[in-house]
Image: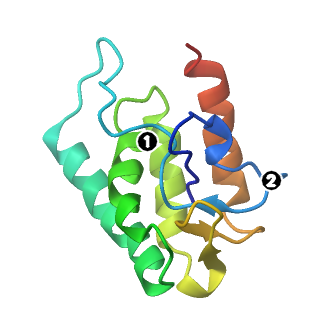
Amino acid sequence: MLACAKDKREDSAVVASSRPALSAQAAAPSSRAPAPGAVIEQATVHAIEKSCTSICERSQKLKCAHAADCQKGCIGMAIGTPCSEQFSGLYTCLLGEPVEHWECGEDGIAALREGYCNKEQEQTVTCMETKAQP
């Protein structure tokens, strides 16, 4: 599901259907502060953490090289973004995909194979490209 870059930000990390797989780690660092004026309820944070724990289990089951990095990136991508609704939809879709639909991505994190959750990935990428401009 979510791809990441360790040293550079890649909004394309949340892969559009025209790109390969989407890895379970986020592009944005978890230390990124919420958007100005954003209020993140504790229940929302808890739900994101719970989703990321389940999503990141794929990296562990597949024995991906950087499985330990997944949780931090997954949470960081979904919190502090103007696209939280799209990430929620994407995470919901990812949670429904069995481990057989995943593989270890080039970044060492589980990546959803091509052909799954395409609509949700596209919506998330589109939102990030339009709303998360520096």
Looking at the image, residue 22 sits to the left or right of residue 62; the answer is right
Q: What element carries label 2?
A: loop
| Relative height, residue 72 to residue 110 (above, below) | above
The residue furthest left is 42
Residue name at image x 35 percent, y 30 percent: 80
Looking at the image, residue 43 sits to the left or right of residue 78; the answer is left
| Relative height, residue 24 to residue 60 (above, below) | above
Report the front residue among 3 and 127.
3
Q: Is mark 1 on a helix, strand or loop?
A: helix
| Relative height, residue 17 to residue 99 (above, below) | above
The label number, if any, that marks residue 19 in the structure image: 2
Instruction: Give the residue type that dot 2 points to.
Output: Arg
Residue 38 percent location from the top left of the image: 30, 20
Residue name at image x 47 percent, y 61 percent: 92
Instruction: Give the residue type that dot 1 points to.
Output: Met
Quarter assignment of residue 30: top left
Quarter assignment of residue 132: top right
Colour setup of the view? rainbow
Residue 95 percent location from the top left of the image: 47, 70
Residue 103 percent location from the top left of the image: 63, 77
Looking at the image, residue 25 sits to the left or right of residue 17; the answer is left
Residue under numbered circle 1: 77
| Relative height, residue 19 to residue 51 (above, below) | above
Residue 126 percent location from the top left of the image: 69, 33
**Among the two numbered marks 2 and 1 on one chain, the one whose residue lies closer to the N terminus:** 2
Q: Quadrant of the C terminus?
A: top right
Residue name at image x 55 percent, y 55 percent: 2
Quarter assignment of residue 81: top left
The residue furthest right is 18
